[in-house]
Image: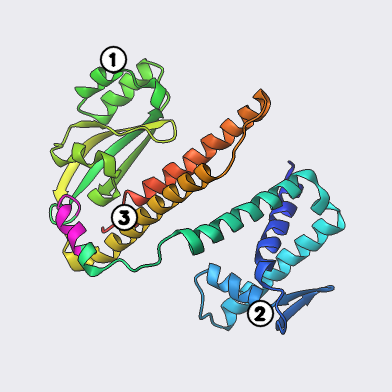
């Protein structure tokens, strides 16, 4: 799809999503663009998306101008019949499905009970490595394709002491890699890999679990203690517990829905397409679980 169609498609998509709740009676109009109206509801949604629920005059005017620009693009796209373009129609339908699915999950699947203070304190006590014994790690990370990490490579890298040695070893074996120097708190590390860092020392090389066909190799170059108290940890614990609970609820709901619904796979071509979609869904679920397996913010 060329750039002009992409821009028009994005404008149409944005308008379609924004318009879902804007057709009520008595909507106040804040601007007109040709024959099209921009309502207070649309403006409110735009400000909310920008984190400006109580915006001043300048921010409000900027938001209105952005909606005007967007409407100009939408009108131009419709005038050029891009709303009938197959790629645009497919993108709008996909967005509609995603919005409906997300609305259903948020309103009908995810639990609404509040996470109690007792649950938060219990989690704090069960995971001293995240809080009372929290550490900060200075690391150099090498991101590689998971399939490139053989037992022989693991052995060759295990004795490496510097980033230069690791880079040289990977390069000599033709392993493409991206390198970053990072500082990470314990809570920012993948939950399933925490045990590998509990006893880690400066100079250790840690291989994380693969994620989306990539694997991170971390060289630990510095460690210092950075404990936090329960009061400071509670908001992050709450978000973690909410994410975990939501992921489990969604997984269980889909399991029951699939068991109760007749699902048929057809010819090889359809099966291949279904497999592709299944892989995408598995990736989405993996991301959901990854978000659930770690707090949402750093405590630096």
* Position of 266 relative to 224 (above/below): above
Residue that mark 1 sits on: 152
Badge 1 vs badge 3, beta-carbon distance below 8 Å: no
Question: Rounded to the nearest whole Å, what is the CA distance between mark 1 and mark 2?
Answer: 63 Å
For marks 1 and 2 on the same chain, the one whose residue lies earlier in the sequence: 2
Magenta-highlighted residues: 121-130
For marks 1 and 3 on the same chain, the one whose residue lies earlier in the sequence: 1
Q: Position of 162 compared to 99: left or right? A: left
Q: Is residue 297 visible?
A: no
Closer to us: mark 1 or mark 3?
3
Residue that mark 3 sits on: 295
Q: Position of 256 compared to 222: left or right? A: right
Q: Position of residue 277 (x, y in %)?
A: 58, 37
Q: Residue at x 57, y 76 (%)?
A: 59
Q: Position of 162 compared to 55: left or right? A: left
Q: SS class of the residue under badge 1?
A: helix
Residue that mark 2 sits on: 40
Relative to the observer, which residue lies in front, 29 or 282?
A: 282
Q: SS class of the residue under badge 3?
A: loop
Q: Residue at x 26, y 51 (%)?
A: 187
Mark 3 packing: few (<14 Cα in 10 Å), some, or many (20+)? many
Quadrant of the frame with the N terminus: top right
Q: SS class of the residue under badge 2?
A: helix
For marks 3 and 2 on the same chain, the one whose residue lies earlier in the sequence: 2
Q: Position of residue 240 (x, y in %)?
A: 32, 57
């Amino acid at each position: 799809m060329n750039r002009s169609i992409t821009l028009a498609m994005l404008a149409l998509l944005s308008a379609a999503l924004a318009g879902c709740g804007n057709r009520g009676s008595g909507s106040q109009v804040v601007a007109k663009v040709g024959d099209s109206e921009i309502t207070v509801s649309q403006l409110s949604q735009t400000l909310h998306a920008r984190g400006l629920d109580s915006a001043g005059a300048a921010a409000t005017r900027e938001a209105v101008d952005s909606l005007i620009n967007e409407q100009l693009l939408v009108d131009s796209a419709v005038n050029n019949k891009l709303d009938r373009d197959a790629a645009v129609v497919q993108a709008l339908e996909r967005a509609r499905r995603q919005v409906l699915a997300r609305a259903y999950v948020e309103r009908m699947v995810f639990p609404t009970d509040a996470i109690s203070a007792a649950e938060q304190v219990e989690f704090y006590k069960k995971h001293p490595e995240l809080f009372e014994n929290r550490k900060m790690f200075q690391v150099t990370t090498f991101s590689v394709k998971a399939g490139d990490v053989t037992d022989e490579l693991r052995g060759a890298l295990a004795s490496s002491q510097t980033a230069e040695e690791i880079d040289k070893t990977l390069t000599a074996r033709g392993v493409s890699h991206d390198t970053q120097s990072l500082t990470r708190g314990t809570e920012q590390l993948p939950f399933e890999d925490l045990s590998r860092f509990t006893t880690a020392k400066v100079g250790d090389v840690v291989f994380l679990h693969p994620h989306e066909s990539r694997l991170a190799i971390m060289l630990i170059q510095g460690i210092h203690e950075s404990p936090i108290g329960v009061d400071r940890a509670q908001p992050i614990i709450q978000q973690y517990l909410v994410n975990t609970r939501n992921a489990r609820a969604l997984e269980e709901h889909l399991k029951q829905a699939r068991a109760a619904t007749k699902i048929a796979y057809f010819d090889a071509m359809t099966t291949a397409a279904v497999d592709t979609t299944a892989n995408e869904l598995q990736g989405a679920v993996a991301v959901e679980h990854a978000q659930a397996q770690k707090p949402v913010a750093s405590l630096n």
